[in-house]
Amino acid sequence: MDIQLGKLIDRFGGQLKGDPDTRVSGFAPLDLAQASHITFLTNPRLRKQANVSHAAALILTPSDDERITDYAGARILTDNPYAYFAYAAQFFQSLQAEPHVPGIHESACIAPSARIAASAKIGPFVTIEADVEIGGNCVIDAGSFIGKGAKVGANTCFAPRVVFHALCVIGERCEVRSGAVIGSEGFGFANDKGVWVKIPQTGRVVIGNDVQIGANTTIDRGALADTVIEDGVKLDNQIQIGHNCHVGAHSAMAGCVGVAGSAVFGKRVTIGGAAMIGGHLKIADGTHVSASSVVQSSINEPGAYTGFYPLEKHTDWERTAVVLRNLTSMRQRVRELEKTVNSLGEKEE
Amino acid sequence: MDIQLGKLIDRFGGQLKGDPDTRVSGFAPLDLAQASHITFLTNPRLRKQANVSHAAALILTPSDDERITDYAGARILTDNPYAYFAYAAQFFQSLQAEPHVPGIHESACIAPSARIAASAKIGPFVTIEADVEIGGNCVIDAGSFIGKGAKVGANTCFAPRVVFHALCVIGERCEVRSGAVIGSEGFGFANDKGVWVKIPQTGRVVIGNDVQIGANTTIDRGALADTVIEDGVKLDNQIQIGHNCHVGAHSAMAGCVGVAGSAVFGKRVTIGGAAMIGGHLKIADGTHVSASSVVQSSINEPGAYTGFYPLEKHTDWERTAVVLRNLTSMRQRVRELEKTVNSLGEKEE
Amino acid sequence: MDIQLGKLIDRFGGQLKGDPDTRVSGFAPLDLAQASHITFLTNPRLRKQANVSHAAALILTPSDDERITDYAGARILTDNPYAYFAYAAQFFQSLQAEPHVPGIHESACIAPSARIAASAKIGPFVTIEADVEIGGNCVIDAGSFIGKGAKVGANTCFAPRVVFHALCVIGERCEVRSGAVIGSEGFGFANDKGVWVKIPQTGRVVIGNDVQIGANTTIDRGALADTVIEDGVKLDNQIQIGHNCHVGAHSAMAGCVGVAGSAVFGKRVTIGGAAMIGGHLKIADGTHVSASSVVQSSINEPGAYTGFYPLEKHTDWERTAVVLRNLTSMRQRVRELEKTVNSLGEKEE
């Protein structure tokens, strides 16, 4: 199954330098691409690979186009080759994908009161409880569970073994990966004379459109109010979102991020992998937090923030750690030195 | 479904200021509460909200009672409003909750030798292996797995898709959330000339009463001895407890905490989110470890302990990190300065 | 079921000091071992326990043999007692283990085109899609899912509720624990004017022989190329491996480790628990990264590397953190002191 470059230009724009009838069958990396492939250049360090690539076509920026002198194949010029690649790759995938066959697998356990669109596909061993609503073209794959009164928007896909708890809501065109648990009870306890007393978690998780939730990621339902994930948010694997958090539209978090309860994210916030965000704080629109950084107070000014201990050879780290623990006394010694040197200086005069 | 304040006082104590016949239908936050709601004040920063709250009743401390002058509704005075809220909210939830219908779902796969109390509820696609014991009023929800010879105490609930491995034991009134894996084999290998040789993990996980285990949390079975979780322990989501750990009664850990093998916790230890506890160490009763902190040696003296790198603007962090790496040389320079200044000072005399 | 020490020597070597007809029924720790048990000494701090152990037999090094004077039982001398214990414990386990009964559970959902060895065991509620291949003596336990065209090598075991996605490949004698998700789509998005555009993840996960994958661990499929886990790799629980990573043979990672996309590990790399490895970097053969350390650039020279903030009492940490944030200014003050003291010194002459 291949396609002419001209057809890609018709669909996705860009300026073609080369024969519009050139046919390509799919993407490959610069170094592995063969005559049937299309590839792309985004990383300046790969210009050499681009120069000698055997790909039939190369997606690149106009400025890189001038730099890449030896490459002989066709070229597609665009200001954002990576996004162009994303759209075109989705198109190639759609050509190969078998359309899902609608219907409910005979082994699935579906409550009579559930409303499931005829165009939806429900896999084996799926449990769907009372009053659930499943929209058109949804795929709920093997072993997934959807609790009472939950709502799933059209064209949303649950991978095998997703748990989506009672009353939670997810919008359209979302993807939830295997092992994700949405709407589990939040971690809320009052302490009564040394014993923990559970606080019922009666809120929901409310998720917008075009949201992606990674494998084994957990999002807790709210305590009294709801936990909210706005449109276009992308969450990687093994992320934990505590109860009553609010994640602004088009924010993205890499794997292993933890977010404590009631944190409020602005829009387009990006969080690096394994960063940890404290509870009851606010993060401004467009903020970036580096991987492995710890945020324990609100960030009101957008920008890039970092806080992790730099790696050293273990023996060096041991020495540094000792000095670090005595940093306040070192500051004190510097202050005293300044005083003494000052007085010495005065005596000079 | 609502209830008179007088009835709440009869059940949960506290001093009522207002009409005992006032009816409330449930809880709401201070700012959202309406005339049918009851609410509570625990955070001093919310006193203003309390003053203008529309709630029918407000739970607060005697000292806050004096400070809250404008609020017009009924008041319940108690020394621990948060615990009072927890107990009362549980009561409201019990009024609304439909009692579970006992019985074994027709799709469940139950070994003939399993002993399941008649009052227990077993959901769809549950697997229960030979010689398992399930106590009265248990709920084992959809897709859960319980291995050979495991024991589940009365009134314990497994959410959908819990895995509880062979021979493990859990007490009464526990809650295990979706995706939790209890009793998986621990990570034990001997290295034989560069190749890892597996050490069989033949211990169990033994869990007490009133324990809560969060979504996608994992607790490994012991190697030779058992992994033990005592009564009243509360574990949030995505926590990893290594083999042979012992967690003391009424300890609590927030999300994403990792505990390496053979760590021994005292009672009432609290661990902040994403903190990491090393293996083979002891933590004293009542110790608190802050979120994102790393514990690599035993804590013998109770108290609050912290160790994470403070967040900075990324450009500042880059500069700080360079100096940090050279901290030992800086200390050396300070020492030399002190020597020189000392000798200079002596020459003065 | 017990065995004579002489038989163990025949199987696993080592030098026996004592009666070869002494019978032992299994392993126990030094302090708990009774007359029917065999035990081992690897930790020098436990020599006292070894001296007074009631075990029938003790595995130890020749050098420890000289130090342990009081212990009266039989002894097995070997250079690697821990590995000896591992092999012997596996043997004891094999004596007790019931052989699995081959066959496909009646509730399992198996595509007609799947090729499943007659000696394999497929548990309840397992889903196996089209064109899957399952090798001899495999165990695929309850509720697991294997996607289209995936291949599972002989003698490999999936615990209950494993997800193994389409086209992925795993070798022989592997163990995958409950809740693991292998081959989920990687986290790849292009940003187009503030909106995230998904990049199809069309690579696979390819896993070698003798690999262990822990509970709730996730390994993403590659974007264009494959994610590769070589022979003998051991991964603990709750580890996240990003798309296109390559993990070298006999590497081992403890729980909660995160590895970002396209990281390349050499052979025999060991990573401590909760360490975080950045994307697109290389780690040299035999490198060790300490627990909770953050690696954000390539490690070309083998050795032990560490980077986590040392724990302090919270009040001390607060003070240290303030000084740490001002470390660059402190360095500046030290430099100025050196200048001043220098000039003072010159004036002296």
Image: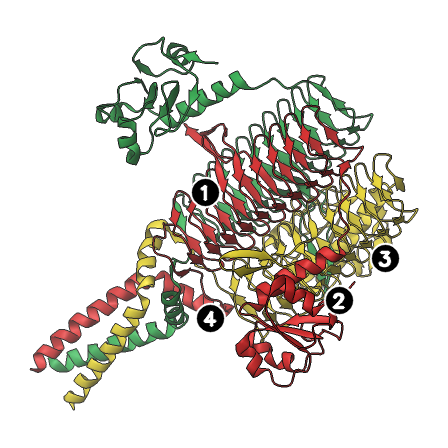
Chain colours: A red, B green, C yellow
What is the secondary structure assignment of the residue under circle 1? strand
Kind of residue indicated by mark 2:
Ser
Q: Residues within 10 Å of mark 2 (few under 14, many from 20)?
A: some
* Disc 2 to disc 4: CB gap under 8 Å: no
Q: Which residue is mark 3?
A: C11
Q: Which residue is mark 1?
A: A246
The residue shown at (46%, 40%) is B269
Q: Residues within 10 Å of mark 4 (few under 14, many from 20)?
A: some
Q: Which residue is mark 2?
A: A25
Q: Earlier in the sequence, mark 2 or mark 1?
A: 2
Q: Earlier in the sequence, mark 4 or mark 1?
A: 1
Q: Examine the rendering and report whether any part of residue B224 can be seen.
A: yes
Kind of residue indicated by mark 1:
His
From the viewer's perspective, is B240 left or right of A20?
left
The correct choice, above or below, for B76 with respect to C277 in the image is: above
Q: Chain of mark 1?
A: A
Query: At which x and y percent is residue C293?
Result: 51, 61
Q: Chain of mark 2?
A: A
Q: Which residue is mark 4?
A: A316
Alpha-carbon span between mark 2 and mark 3:
57 Å
The correct choice, above or below, for C151 with respect to A5 in the image is: above
Query: At which x and y percent is residue C57?
Result: 75, 50
The correct choice, above or below, for A294 with respect to C281 in the image is: above
From the viewer's perspective, is A333 left or right of A227?
left
Q: Residues within 10 Å of mark 3 (few under 14, many from 20)?
A: few
Alpha-carbon span between mark 3 and mark 4:
45 Å
Q: Earlier in the sequence, mark 2 or mark 4?
A: 2
